[in-house]
Image (cartoon, rainbow, N blue to C red):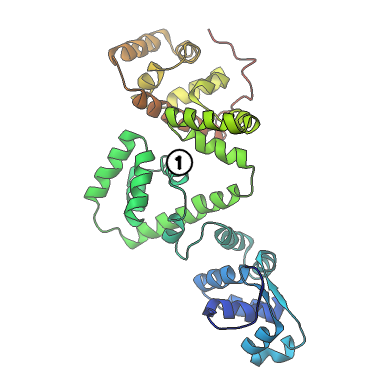
Amino acid sequence: MSGSRSSRHGMTGPQKAAIVMLALGEERSAPLFSTLHEDEIREISAAMSQLGRISSEMVEEICREFSEQTGGGGNLLGNLESTERLLMKILPQDKAHQILEEIRGPAGRTMWDKLANVSESVLAAYLRNEYPQTVAVILSRIRSEHAAKVLALLPEGFASDVVMRMLRMDAVQRDVMDGVEKTLRVDFMASLSRSTRRDAHELMAEIFNSLDRDSESRFMHTLEGKDQEAAERIKSLMFTFDDLVRLTPQAVQVMLRAVPKDRLPLALKGASPQVQALVFGNLPDRASKMLREDIDSLGPVRRRDVDEAQAAVVAVVKDLANRGEIEINDSTDEQMVG
């Protein structure tokens, strides 16, 4: 918030409370903060981080009862840094970090308000790794037009499952809803806030990974025409189905045990010869023969269905890597494909 505030007209209660806390200083405001409810702390903290510069006249007007401490204090500056120092002093570190991440995250008072300000592509990329029932609950709580855009970006089979669960869904119990909100706050919003402070190319690589093949090719082609260097960097950070050749034989074995059996034949139907050879080479002869027969029995398939199956395999691989169960090599130089 730019400029300096000189009038209390139109200020909200949390903004006025934030000014009082700042005027009291970290030592004096800490006992007051400790008596507040967590939601009140979150609301005042958010207001404090956006106050900007407050004139001394405004401070005196709002904090008359504290004039001895604030009368000669001059201007105050309410920003994220001062808010962070105060919260770290009065709250456990993990709780303070959680509140700060929410302040930095998308705008909105409630979790559902915040979700409304999250791009549908980013939200879809997160939800495709959740249980269909959880996704159904979340999509039933956000604006219908936003939910429609997110649903359209989910894999077709997965999206159909979500739709059926939404149709059959009864009133959601309060404890279930609390659990969903907590998961969104701790996992999604916190990681989304952190992503705003990391390399933008990294974030775009994750988004491109979540696009279908046609959309990815279209966007990448456009980007190559405008910024070849950025396009190359994003490509180097992406992990696609063709990048399975970067896996070690041990990692492939782990992947094959984790990938849904109905996804693998469809994913391999449109795979490169190198990827097919890698998978077949890591299966026993009998299992390899059965997989080839399953692929042949599929007949002609839609490109979109193949893309969705391959995306599901990639999601499994990335999840295994995130959990430390496999490693993804940086290059394919040492990979042998038989």
Q: Residue at x 60, y 49 (%)?
A: 196
Horizontal and vertical percent position of residue 71: 74, 88
Does residue 120 appear in the picture of this structure? yes
**Toward which corner of the image does residue 76 lie, by quadrant?**
bottom right
Disc 1 on helix, strand or loop?
helix
Q: Which of 295 and 80 is in front in this view?
A: 80
The residue furthest left is 168
Within 10 Å of disc 1 (Cα), the crowding (few <14, some 14-19, many 20+) is many
Image coords of residue 250 (percent x, y): 55, 20
Q: Where is residue 235 in the image (x, y as percent from the top left)?
A: 58, 28
At horizontal 76% and vertical 83% (from top left) the residue drawn is 73
Q: In this view, does 165 lie above or below 337?
A: below
Which residue is found at the position 59% from the left and 27% from the top? 328
- In the picture of the structure, the residue carrying the numbered disc 1 is 125
Question: Image height check: is 27 above or below 79?
Answer: below
Given the image, on which type of amino acid does mark 1 rest?
Ala
In which image quadrant can residue 260 be found?
top left
Q: In this view, does 149 lie above or below 84?
A: above
Query: Residue 101, position in %: x, y?
Result: 58, 58
Q: In which quarter of the image is the N terminus?
A: bottom right
| Residue 139 visible somewhere in the drawing | no
Please identify the quarter of the rendering in which residue 61 is found. bottom right
Identify the residue at image location x=36%, y=23%: 303
Q: Residue furthest front?
A: 225
